[in-house]
Image (cartoon, rainbow, N blue to C red):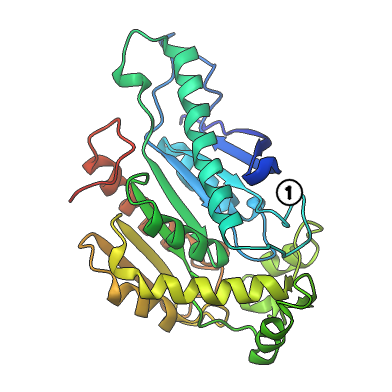
Amino acid sequence: MHRVTMHRTDGTFPGFNGLPLYYQCWREDDPRNASRNGQPKAKPKAIIALVHGLGGHSGFFKNIFHALAPQGYVLYALDLRGHGRSPGQRGYINRWDEFRQDIDCFISFATERELKLSHEMRGSSDDALNQPLPCVLMGHSLGGAISLDYAIRHPNTLAGVVAIAPALGVVGIPPLKMAIGKILSNVWPGFTLHTGINDGAASRDPAIISQYQSDPLRHTRGTARLATEFIATAHWIHDHADQLASPLLILQGTADQVSLPEGSDRFFQNVQFPDKTRYEYDGGYHDLHNDTIFGDVLDDLSHWLEGQISAATLPSACPISV
Protein backbone atom coordinates (compact mmCIF):
# COMPACT_ATOMS: atom_id res chain seq x y z
CA MET A 1 0.00 0.00 0.00
CA HIS A 2 1.40 3.40 -1.01
CA ARG A 3 1.96 5.63 2.00
CA VAL A 4 0.96 9.26 1.56
CA THR A 5 3.65 11.71 2.64
CA MET A 6 2.36 15.07 3.79
CA HIS A 7 4.49 18.15 3.23
CA ARG A 8 3.93 21.26 5.35
CA THR A 9 5.54 24.68 5.10
CA ASP A 10 4.78 27.90 6.94
CA GLY A 11 5.84 31.51 7.09
CA THR A 12 4.39 34.98 6.68
CA PHE A 13 3.09 37.04 3.79
CA PRO A 14 2.37 40.79 3.62
CA GLY A 15 -1.27 41.52 4.31
CA PHE A 16 -3.08 44.85 4.05
CA ASN A 17 -0.73 47.76 4.80
CA GLY A 18 2.16 45.28 4.92
CA LEU A 19 1.10 43.54 8.15
CA PRO A 20 2.99 40.20 8.27
CA LEU A 21 0.30 37.52 8.48
CA TYR A 22 1.11 33.91 9.34
CA TYR A 23 0.19 31.09 6.97
CA GLN A 24 0.75 27.37 6.62
CA CYS A 25 0.63 25.32 3.44
CA TRP A 26 -0.07 21.59 3.10
CA ARG A 27 0.32 19.33 0.07
CA GLU A 28 0.84 15.64 -0.57
CA ASP A 29 4.61 15.85 -0.95
CA ASP A 30 7.44 18.32 -1.36
CA PRO A 31 6.95 19.68 -4.90
CA ARG A 32 10.72 19.68 -5.38
CA ASN A 33 10.82 15.90 -5.07
CA ALA A 34 10.58 14.08 -8.40
CA SER A 35 7.90 11.46 -8.86
CA ARG A 36 8.84 7.78 -9.00
CA ASN A 37 9.47 7.94 -12.76
CA GLY A 38 11.86 10.87 -12.34
CA GLN A 39 9.47 13.46 -13.77
CA PRO A 40 8.27 16.55 -11.91
CA LYS A 41 5.30 16.08 -9.60
CA ALA A 42 1.87 16.52 -11.13
CA LYS A 43 0.48 20.01 -10.90
CA PRO A 44 -2.00 20.45 -8.02
CA LYS A 45 -5.68 20.40 -8.97
CA ALA A 46 -6.45 23.68 -7.24
CA ILE A 47 -5.59 25.99 -4.37
CA ILE A 48 -7.87 25.74 -1.34
CA ALA A 49 -7.57 28.98 0.67
CA LEU A 50 -8.82 28.50 4.24
CA VAL A 51 -10.10 31.19 6.61
CA HIS A 52 -10.78 30.35 10.27
CA GLY A 53 -13.37 31.78 12.65
CA LEU A 54 -13.27 34.22 15.56
CA GLY A 55 -10.66 33.20 18.11
CA GLY A 56 -9.36 30.36 15.96
CA HIS A 57 -6.27 29.93 13.82
CA SER A 58 -4.98 28.00 10.82
CA GLY A 59 -4.21 24.90 12.90
CA PHE A 60 -7.92 24.18 13.34
CA PHE A 61 -8.09 22.73 9.81
CA LYS A 62 -5.90 19.65 10.25
CA ASN A 63 -8.68 17.21 9.34
CA ILE A 64 -9.25 19.13 6.12
CA PHE A 65 -5.51 19.21 5.36
CA HIS A 66 -5.22 15.46 5.78
CA ALA A 67 -8.35 14.75 3.74
CA LEU A 68 -7.70 16.99 0.75
CA ALA A 69 -3.91 17.14 0.31
CA PRO A 70 -3.67 13.45 -0.70
CA GLN A 71 -6.34 14.14 -3.35
CA GLY A 72 -4.02 16.53 -5.15
CA TYR A 73 -5.06 19.89 -3.71
CA VAL A 74 -2.65 22.39 -2.22
CA LEU A 75 -4.08 24.01 0.90
CA TYR A 76 -3.18 27.41 2.28
CA ALA A 77 -4.53 28.57 5.65
CA LEU A 78 -3.83 31.93 7.25
CA ASP A 79 -4.08 33.35 10.75
CA LEU A 80 -6.26 36.45 10.51
CA ARG A 81 -4.93 39.70 11.98
CA GLY A 82 -5.43 39.61 15.73
CA HIS A 83 -5.46 35.81 15.74
CA GLY A 84 -3.04 32.92 16.16
CA ARG A 85 0.53 33.75 15.21
CA SER A 86 -0.42 36.93 13.35
CA PRO A 87 0.10 40.32 15.01
CA GLY A 88 -2.61 42.71 16.14
CA GLN A 89 -4.91 43.16 19.11
CA ARG A 90 -6.84 39.96 19.70
CA GLY A 91 -10.22 40.07 18.00
CA TYR A 92 -9.86 43.64 16.73
CA ILE A 93 -10.25 45.26 13.34
CA ASN A 94 -10.83 48.91 12.58
CA ARG A 95 -12.85 48.22 9.43
CA TRP A 96 -14.06 45.01 7.76
CA ASP A 97 -12.19 46.11 4.67
CA GLU A 98 -9.00 45.05 6.48
CA PHE A 99 -10.23 41.45 6.26
CA ARG A 100 -11.16 41.90 2.59
CA GLN A 101 -7.77 43.31 1.71
CA ASP A 102 -5.98 40.61 3.71
CA ILE A 103 -7.85 37.88 1.81
CA ASP A 104 -6.99 39.57 -1.47
CA CYS A 105 -3.31 39.60 -0.47
CA PHE A 106 -3.58 35.99 0.72
CA ILE A 107 -5.05 34.66 -2.53
CA SER A 108 -2.54 36.63 -4.61
CA PHE A 109 0.32 35.32 -2.48
CA ALA A 110 -0.77 31.68 -2.76
CA THR A 111 -1.39 31.96 -6.51
CA GLU A 112 1.96 33.61 -7.20
CA ARG A 113 3.81 31.16 -4.96
CA GLU A 114 2.32 28.19 -6.80
CA LEU A 115 3.19 29.74 -10.17
CA LYS A 116 6.77 30.20 -9.03
CA LEU A 117 7.00 26.59 -7.83
CA SER A 118 5.51 25.34 -11.09
CA HIS A 119 8.00 27.36 -13.11
CA GLU A 120 10.91 26.05 -11.03
CA MET A 121 9.79 22.44 -11.47
CA ARG A 122 8.63 22.48 -15.09
CA GLY A 123 10.32 25.43 -16.74
CA SER A 124 8.56 27.84 -19.04
CA SER A 125 8.23 25.65 -22.15
CA ASP A 126 4.65 24.56 -21.44
CA ASP A 127 2.40 27.58 -21.09
CA ALA A 128 -0.57 25.43 -20.07
CA LEU A 129 1.28 24.09 -17.03
CA ASN A 130 2.32 27.57 -15.98
CA GLN A 131 -1.15 29.13 -15.80
CA PRO A 132 -2.62 30.10 -12.40
CA LEU A 133 -4.36 27.34 -10.47
CA PRO A 134 -8.09 27.64 -9.79
CA CYS A 135 -8.72 28.89 -6.26
CA VAL A 136 -11.54 27.83 -3.95
CA LEU A 137 -12.06 30.07 -0.92
CA MET A 138 -13.24 28.17 2.17
CA GLY A 139 -14.18 29.74 5.49
CA HIS A 140 -15.55 28.62 8.84
CA SER A 141 -17.89 30.72 11.01
CA LEU A 142 -16.56 34.29 10.92
CA GLY A 143 -14.26 33.04 8.15
CA GLY A 144 -17.37 31.91 6.28
CA ALA A 145 -18.76 35.43 6.41
CA ILE A 146 -15.40 36.82 5.30
CA SER A 147 -15.34 34.35 2.39
CA LEU A 148 -18.89 35.06 1.23
CA ASP A 149 -18.36 38.82 1.42
CA TYR A 150 -15.19 38.45 -0.65
CA ALA A 151 -16.80 36.12 -3.19
CA ILE A 152 -19.71 38.48 -3.82
CA ARG A 153 -17.34 41.41 -4.34
CA HIS A 154 -14.82 39.47 -6.50
CA PRO A 155 -16.87 37.34 -8.91
CA ASN A 156 -14.04 36.77 -11.40
CA THR A 157 -11.33 35.48 -9.07
CA LEU A 158 -12.70 32.26 -7.55
CA ALA A 159 -13.53 28.78 -8.81
CA GLY A 160 -15.90 28.37 -5.87
CA VAL A 161 -16.65 29.34 -2.29
CA VAL A 162 -17.30 27.01 0.65
CA ALA A 163 -18.88 28.27 3.87
CA ILE A 164 -18.80 25.97 6.91
CA ALA A 165 -21.33 27.16 9.52
CA PRO A 166 -21.05 30.74 8.26
CA ALA A 167 -21.72 33.49 10.80
CA LEU A 168 -24.44 35.45 9.04
CA GLY A 169 -25.96 37.53 11.80
CA VAL A 170 -27.97 34.81 13.57
CA VAL A 171 -25.30 33.86 16.10
CA GLY A 172 -25.12 32.50 19.62
CA ILE A 173 -23.30 35.46 21.17
CA PRO A 174 -25.52 36.88 23.97
CA PRO A 175 -27.56 39.86 22.65
CA LEU A 176 -26.48 42.04 25.59
CA LYS A 177 -22.82 41.67 24.62
CA MET A 178 -23.61 42.54 21.01
CA ALA A 179 -25.53 45.62 22.21
CA ILE A 180 -22.64 46.73 24.42
CA GLY A 181 -20.27 46.33 21.50
CA LYS A 182 -22.48 48.46 19.28
CA ILE A 183 -22.68 51.26 21.87
CA LEU A 184 -18.94 51.31 22.53
CA SER A 185 -17.76 50.97 18.93
CA ASN A 186 -17.47 54.70 18.30
CA VAL A 187 -16.16 55.79 21.71
CA TRP A 188 -13.97 52.80 22.64
CA PRO A 189 -13.56 50.60 19.54
CA GLY A 190 -10.85 48.43 21.09
CA PHE A 191 -12.92 47.55 24.15
CA THR A 192 -12.72 43.78 24.58
CA LEU A 193 -15.32 41.33 25.81
CA HIS A 194 -15.29 37.57 26.00
CA THR A 195 -17.77 36.21 23.47
CA GLY A 196 -19.61 34.14 26.06
CA ILE A 197 -19.89 31.18 23.70
CA ASN A 198 -19.73 27.81 25.43
CA ASP A 199 -16.62 25.83 24.44
CA GLY A 200 -18.74 22.69 24.25
CA ALA A 201 -20.79 24.15 21.40
CA ALA A 202 -17.91 23.59 18.98
CA SER A 203 -17.86 19.79 18.83
CA ARG A 204 -19.32 16.63 20.34
CA ASP A 205 -15.82 15.14 20.55
CA PRO A 206 -14.48 15.64 24.11
CA ALA A 207 -10.90 15.32 22.86
CA ILE A 208 -11.41 18.27 20.50
CA ILE A 209 -12.88 20.42 23.28
CA SER A 210 -9.93 19.56 25.51
CA GLN A 211 -7.51 20.54 22.74
CA TYR A 212 -9.28 23.84 22.22
CA GLN A 213 -9.25 24.69 25.92
CA SER A 214 -5.52 24.03 26.23
CA ASP A 215 -4.56 25.75 22.96
CA PRO A 216 -2.46 28.86 23.74
CA LEU A 217 -3.13 30.33 20.28
CA ARG A 218 -6.91 30.23 20.65
CA HIS A 219 -8.84 33.07 22.26
CA THR A 220 -12.47 33.90 23.07
CA ARG A 221 -12.33 37.67 22.71
CA GLY A 222 -14.03 40.15 20.44
CA THR A 223 -13.92 43.93 20.37
CA ALA A 224 -16.63 46.56 20.13
CA ARG A 225 -15.59 47.61 16.64
CA LEU A 226 -15.48 44.03 15.37
CA ALA A 227 -19.04 43.52 16.63
CA THR A 228 -20.44 46.48 14.71
CA GLU A 229 -18.43 45.70 11.58
CA PHE A 230 -19.63 42.09 11.71
CA ILE A 231 -23.29 43.09 12.07
CA ALA A 232 -23.07 45.55 9.17
CA THR A 233 -21.28 43.01 6.95
CA ALA A 234 -23.75 40.21 7.74
CA HIS A 235 -26.60 42.49 6.68
CA TRP A 236 -24.72 43.43 3.51
CA ILE A 237 -24.10 39.78 2.63
CA HIS A 238 -27.80 38.93 2.98
CA ASP A 239 -28.82 42.00 0.98
CA HIS A 240 -26.45 41.09 -1.87
CA ALA A 241 -26.88 37.30 -1.94
CA ASP A 242 -28.40 37.55 -5.40
CA GLN A 243 -25.10 38.97 -6.69
CA LEU A 244 -23.03 35.90 -5.84
CA ALA A 245 -21.66 34.53 -9.12
CA SER A 246 -19.41 31.68 -7.95
CA PRO A 247 -20.28 28.03 -7.25
CA LEU A 248 -21.39 27.77 -3.62
CA LEU A 249 -21.27 25.02 -1.00
CA ILE A 250 -22.66 25.55 2.51
CA LEU A 251 -22.10 22.95 5.24
CA GLN A 252 -24.34 23.41 8.29
CA GLY A 253 -25.06 21.45 11.47
CA THR A 254 -28.67 21.39 12.66
CA ALA A 255 -27.58 21.64 16.33
CA ASP A 256 -25.21 24.57 15.77
CA GLN A 257 -25.76 27.05 18.62
CA VAL A 258 -23.05 29.47 17.46
CA SER A 259 -24.02 30.14 13.83
CA LEU A 260 -27.68 29.19 13.82
CA PRO A 261 -28.90 27.24 10.75
CA GLU A 262 -31.53 29.81 9.77
CA GLY A 263 -28.80 32.32 8.91
CA SER A 264 -27.16 30.17 6.25
CA ASP A 265 -30.53 28.89 5.00
CA ARG A 266 -31.82 32.43 4.46
CA PHE A 267 -28.69 33.35 2.52
CA PHE A 268 -28.84 30.17 0.45
CA GLN A 269 -32.47 30.73 -0.52
CA ASN A 270 -31.63 34.23 -1.76
CA VAL A 271 -28.69 33.14 -3.93
CA GLN A 272 -29.76 33.19 -7.58
CA PHE A 273 -26.64 31.58 -9.04
CA PRO A 274 -27.76 28.09 -10.13
CA ASP A 275 -24.66 26.20 -8.98
CA LYS A 276 -25.39 26.15 -5.26
CA THR A 277 -25.46 23.30 -2.73
CA ARG A 278 -26.29 23.24 0.98
CA TYR A 279 -25.88 20.20 3.23
CA GLU A 280 -27.38 19.98 6.71
CA TYR A 281 -26.02 17.44 9.19
CA ASP A 282 -28.48 16.18 11.76
CA GLY A 283 -27.17 16.96 15.24
CA GLY A 284 -24.00 18.54 13.88
CA TYR A 285 -22.25 21.15 16.02
CA HIS A 286 -20.45 24.34 15.00
CA ASP A 287 -17.01 22.99 14.02
CA LEU A 288 -18.28 20.35 11.59
CA HIS A 289 -14.78 19.59 10.33
CA ASN A 290 -13.82 18.68 13.92
CA ASP A 291 -17.14 17.17 15.02
CA THR A 292 -17.85 13.47 15.46
CA ILE A 293 -19.25 13.36 11.91
CA PHE A 294 -16.26 15.03 10.27
CA GLY A 295 -15.72 12.02 7.99
CA ASP A 296 -19.14 12.42 6.37
CA VAL A 297 -18.65 16.18 6.10
CA LEU A 298 -15.28 15.84 4.40
CA ASP A 299 -16.61 13.18 2.02
CA ASP A 300 -19.30 15.60 0.87
CA LEU A 301 -16.74 18.38 0.58
CA SER A 302 -14.40 16.17 -1.47
CA HIS A 303 -17.15 15.13 -3.88
CA TRP A 304 -18.27 18.72 -4.40
CA LEU A 305 -14.72 19.91 -5.03
CA GLU A 306 -14.05 17.10 -7.49
CA GLY A 307 -17.14 18.02 -9.45
CA GLN A 308 -16.26 21.70 -9.55
CA ILE A 309 -12.61 21.28 -10.48
CA SER A 310 -13.41 18.58 -13.06
CA ALA A 311 -15.96 20.93 -14.63
CA ALA A 312 -13.42 23.70 -14.96
CA THR A 313 -11.38 24.20 -18.09
CA LEU A 314 -7.98 23.74 -16.49
CA PRO A 315 -5.86 25.55 -15.89
CA SER A 316 -8.07 28.56 -15.14
CA ALA A 317 -8.55 31.01 -12.32
CA CYS A 318 -12.00 32.07 -13.56
CA PRO A 319 -15.35 31.10 -12.02
CA ILE A 320 -16.81 27.85 -13.26
CA SER A 321 -19.83 28.11 -15.53
CA VAL A 322 -22.14 25.13 -15.12
Q: Position of residue 145 (x, y in %)?
A: 50, 66
Mark 1: give few (<14), some (14-19) or many (20+) Cα within 10 Å.
many
Left or right for 67, reference 11: left
Q: Is residue 148 visible?
A: yes
Q: Residue at x 44, y 8 (%)?
A: 38
Left or right for 39, reference 245: right
Q: Residue at x 23, y 62 (%)?
A: 273
Q: Which residue is mark 1?
A: 86
Q: Is residue 36 visible?
A: no
Which residue in the rendered view is the most extreme toward the left? 322
Q: Position of residue 303 (x, y in %)?
A: 32, 52
Which residue is at the front of the view, 287 or 20?
A: 20
Residue 299 against residue 2 in the figure, above or below:
below
Q: Residue at x 41, y 31 (%)?
A: 44
Number of numbered labels in the structure image: 1
Q: Position of residue 213 (x, y in %)?
A: 77, 67
Q: At numbered mark 1, what does the secondary structure look like: helix, strand or loop?
A: loop
Q: Residue at x 42, y 9 (%)?
A: 123
Q: Position of residue 239 (x, y in %)?
A: 37, 75
